[in-house]
Amino acid sequence: MIDLLPSLNATLNATATILLLIGWRLVRTGRVEAHKKVMTAAVVVSALFLVSYLTYHSLGEEKRFAEQGILRIVYFIILATHIPLAGLMVPPILALLWFGYHDQIDRHRKLARITLPIWLYVSVTGVLIYLFLYLLWPPA
């Protein structure tokens, strides 16, 4: 059962990416209430990812990227940016929720312009890390 968590994690990351893009599109077209619902769903999906990720890494077997050469360099560049950005995203995401639900729209917009691209990067690179480790170049 624990072996299914990496696939679940990648699915949750991909789902968050899609929700973020839909939420961005909704707010750009003036559908604020729909935007709130979709972005709340993105936060919930990301929180589920975090629980699943922490569960896997506390109970599962650690995977190491075994490839050498340029692939290894690319993998570690992605990983080295993904991990700290993922950790740093929690406070601004919570602040965005607070600002949005308390009608502090100017503060919400200003923070979202910085947070959204980073959150998207973290979600997409999470899927890439899964692909590198589990599908494309799994350890022998």
Image (cartoon, rainbow, N blue to C red):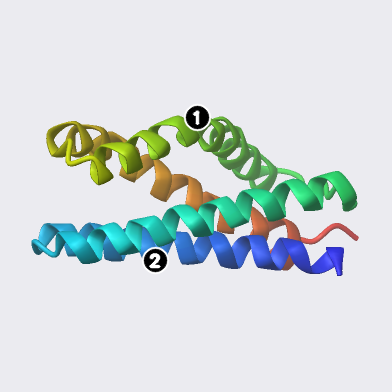
Residue at position x 28%, y 34% from top? 114
Q: Amino acid at mark 1?
A: Leu
Toward the front, the furthest residue is 102
- Say whether residue 67 is visible: no
Task: Return the x and y of residue 33 as percentages of the image width and height.
Answer: 20, 62
Task: Return the x and y of residue 72 as percentages of the image width and height.
Answer: 69, 43
Residue at position x 60%, y 36% from top? 83
Which residue lies under the disc numbered 2?
18
Task: Return the x and y of residue 65 as percentages of the image width and height.
Answer: 78, 48
Q: Earlier in the sequence, mark 2 or mark 1?
A: 2
Nearer to the camera, 10 or 132? 10
Toward the left, the furthest residue is 30
Q: Tag 1, which secondary structure? A: helix
Q: Is residue 56 left or right of residue 95?
A: right
Residue at position x 58%, y 36% from top? 77
Nearer to the camera, 11 or 102? 102
Q: Is residue 111 left or right of residue 61?
A: left
**Where 106 falls versus 29 (above or below)?**
above
Among the 4 quarters of the image, the one containing residue 24? bottom left
**Where 34 falls versus 106 (above or below)?**
below
Q: Which quadrant is home to the C terminus?
A: bottom right
Which residue lies under the disc numbered 1?
88
